[in-house]
Amino acid sequence: MVFSTIFRSFTTVTQAAILSADFDVMFSRLSVPIMLVDDKSSLLNINSSGADLFRMQPEELRGQFWAGLDAQLTLIQWRQRLQQLRSQPFLHYETDILTENEFLRPVHVELCRIGENQVLIRLTDKLPDRLREGQIELLSESTQTGFWFYNRVDRHWYVSPVAGKLLGLSEGFVNEEIIESFQRNLNPTDWKKVQEVATKTLEKNETFDHLLRIEGEEGSAMVKISGRSVRNALHVTLVYGIVELDNKYKEQPGEQQHISGELAMFSIDQARDMIFWTGPDGSVSYVNQTVCNKLKYSQEEMKDIQVFDFVRDFGPDDIEALYTNLREIKSLESEFTLISREGKEIEISAVVNYLRFGDKEYACSFCRDISKRKAKDQRRKLSEFTIDRSVEMVVWSNPDGSVHFVNNTFLEVTGYTAKEAKELNLEDVFTHITAENMPEMWKTLRGSGSLTKEVVMRRKDGSLLPVGATLNHLVFEDREFSCSLFRDLSMKKRRDTTIELSHMALDSAGDCILWLDAEYRVNYLNQTLLNLLNNPKEEMIGQELYRIFPSLSPSDIVPNSVLDIAFDAGAAGTRHLNLNCTGLEHDGEQYYMLVGRDITRMSERQEQLEEAYTEIRGLQDRLQEENISLREEVNTKYNINKIITVSPKYQKVLRQIGRVADTDATVLITGETGTGKELLARAVHQLSDRVDYPMIKVNCAALPENLIESELFGHEKGAFTGALARKKGRFEVADTGTLFLDEVGECPLDLQTKLLRVLQEGEFERVGGSETIKVDVRLVAATNRDLEEMVADGRFRADLYYRLNVFPISNLPLRERTEDIPVLVEHFVQKFSLKQGKTISKISKGDMEKLRNYPFPGNVRELENMIERAVILTDSETLNIRIDPIRPQAAGGSQRLLTFEEMQRKHIIDALKFTGGRVTGPEGAGVLLDMNDRTLVSKMRKLGIKKREYLV
Ligand SMILES: Nc1ncnc2c1ncn2[C@@H]1O[C@H](COP(=O)(O)OP(=O)(O)OP(=O)(O)O)[C@@H](O)[C@H]1O
């Protein structure tokens, strides 16, 4: 019953408790055979009662396998049992265990699992219970029947005193001597019979009944020995039986009396207790055989000595005091130390009885050797001593909270005396324990077997102390205890605070900190680094280095080195770290610390700076080139900003302009439409000495044939219908300045003749006038036509062509200077954004690439229009541009087919150029285009055409 409680209480014992010294002590103290095995059935611990069943020492058994000791158990069965133990708390079965002498002992096995992988095994010896020797002796005496048995497994003989007497065995017989002694009392024939019977009985499960003549010291007698055997699956384990006098002897009452007296004496002699009869003077009247055996004196020798000779520290005064006491209370219990003949000390516990026969007084003492118990007490004291010196406070308490035991550490820490401590209750000491919650605590403790928590302890002076507590539930000798261990946490708390502070400091450091272990796995990383990685800390600990910095490998981690790395920090983009690597050794382990400074901004600035330098270098180079062509050769009035270019080829063109500008030479600018011929013409004017005088433009293609002459040379009043007043012609207006003849290839042939005259003679007459007018005009002409071809075809006068072609400048199409596209885009975006009041600062890389690859048949004008449209459509910082797919070329011509909108646009612009920007009225573009003025205005708005750009 007691055991089963303990056994069950073990099921709740935690792993920590199993490892504790207390557990070991308790385990070894248990009298029931018990052992602890792991899941591989290896025996971790066994107490001495358990080891006795194997007839071995605990040390010999530890480490052996239960599956080997259990004669019927295989390893597979053991695994099955373990499996069963997962779903049920206990398992029982019957088996045989293999003893040291290779006998099988039948046992009952009880298994229960404790902790994760340990099993507690309780064994119950199933060899038939021995009757207690005392009981047997009683029975023997009253029935005059002797009992005996032979435990074959333990090779243990028991022969009750009556049986011994009947078999004529000598006194003080022990195991091996019994057979020898017995044989001596038998005649050889009987001995042979006995041997045969014994062999048969041990082989089979037999009963026997045998009559033998015993030749004892006190004459011969006929005795009957009966017996039977008990066996297990393999062999007989036990033989037992009785011995009694043959009936014929029993019928003799005198003899019976005699034997009975003898047996009584014999019984006393063989009793386990030491029995002394002593007188008040210290003389020894009688000692039994057990005393002789223990003290190593013979019966005779004992009669010559006094109690003072073998009881330590016991003198005449003591015996007198003892008798005084005995006469009054008749019986007393006391402990003495006996000294054997060899000087060995034997601790005894004695029950001393007072006997009086006539005038003679005796002290009859029944003494039991308690040396073993004393040694145990000694051991207990030693463990208490050890507990007292433990750094942990130990408190054993009862279920009502009253303190059962405290160690010295507890007294030192709390300031209580040992006496005061005994009066304490847990609720006096721990702030969290109250009489109300105590039952709950015990319930939890019983359920889980152990509790660990941080609590606050109240010292005697009322001051509080944080302690770490481990409470264990233990049942010892049928009593429940809580065995609690407390550790002063104030130091730990202080250390924890320091650690916490250091962690906070590391976390709030501006630098990224990463600790790696010897395997280059993450041991710690601070918050700064975590913020960059954007991953939970738990996921990062234990990870390999590349998970943090993919570009780093363990071989890069060299103590005292500095590394610059870039890594992808997700949403935060690419980050640049400057890492300092340090190697450290702690507790014999190697660690590496990487302290990284985020130098992303610095790197970005560096990159920006480098970009800026490159740009500046580029600008410098460009400026240097421009300087050569423009600043050195061209006058300072030249407005370089209006001509945007980075193309070296185009700069050659500009250098030509610079060279010819301040001469009076006629300049012929050729090139595809929209390449900027007019821009070059204006540059020639601006860079010439005539810059302070007007540059007058005449678009030869836009002038109606009937008006062209009067437009160029002017007319007198009434020269033709509608000539209401005299009007100066463009040549006259351009006097001392520059006349720009745009699209000169479109000039009608008769006009070409008149033009030639002006160019050759520098004079002309107004239409309808006779006055010869002389003008000083610098002529710049431009055309997108191949004049040479026209001359060859007779569509252009050769002499005029040579007159114009004094200084030919061939303008480049945009597709031959694609490097100008990005700068022109930027220029136009800026120009139109400003106009539209927008802030557009970006263009996608893809769009820019598309633009660079676009052939721009309409050249810079087409690009300009494209950008203007895009700016109108853009509502963000990034230009929203649509690059039209390239359209086929117009059949037979060099120009591509214009869209309907482009065509309308070109047509309106041409009209505006002709009217000098006038839209409405009799001289407006509406009349030319045969369009209602309001329709034209709205069309222009829709197409983004500004009349002021065409005002002359
Ligand atoms: N290098 C340049 N830098 C800035 N703008 C330019 C450049 N070249 C041309 N442009 C612009 O392109 C548009 C067309 O230029 P321009 O009228 O001079 O060309 P064009 O060759 O005379 O055309 P067309 O043959 O149709 O008369 C104008 O708005 C002009 O300012």
Image: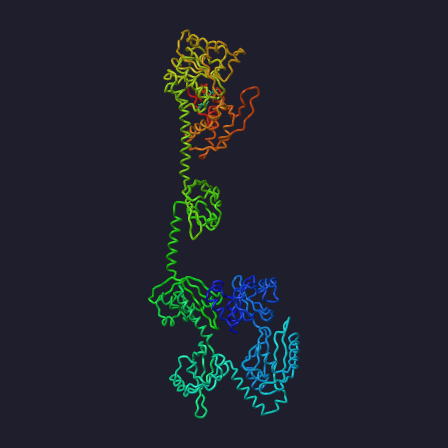
Asked if residue 794 can be seen in this view, the reply is: yes
Which one is in front, 330 or 399? 330
Q: Which x, y percent locates residue 285?
A: 46, 87
**What x and y, as percent, mark residue 461?**
33, 66
**How many discs appear?**
0
Would residue 273 be seen by someone viewing this image from the given angle?
Answer: no
952 above or below 486? above
**Image position, residue 699 (x, y; %):** 46, 17
Residue 507 vs residue 115: left or right? left
Name the foreground residue: 657 vs 175: 175
What residue appears at the point 45 percent right and 81 percent down from the top-left corner? 350
Q: Quadrant of residue 113?
A: bottom right
Quadrant in which the C terminus appears: top left
Between residues 123 and 60, which one lies in front from this camera angle?
A: 60
Task: Depth check: give the residue in front, 180 or 143.
Answer: 180
Q: Quadrant of residue 321?
A: bottom left
Give the answer, above or below, for where 516 lies relative to 925: below
Residue 586 in the image: above or below residue 154: above
Rendering coords of residue 928 (x, y %): 48, 19
Question: Which colour style is shown?
Answer: rainbow
Residue at the limit of the structure toward the left, as seen here: 461
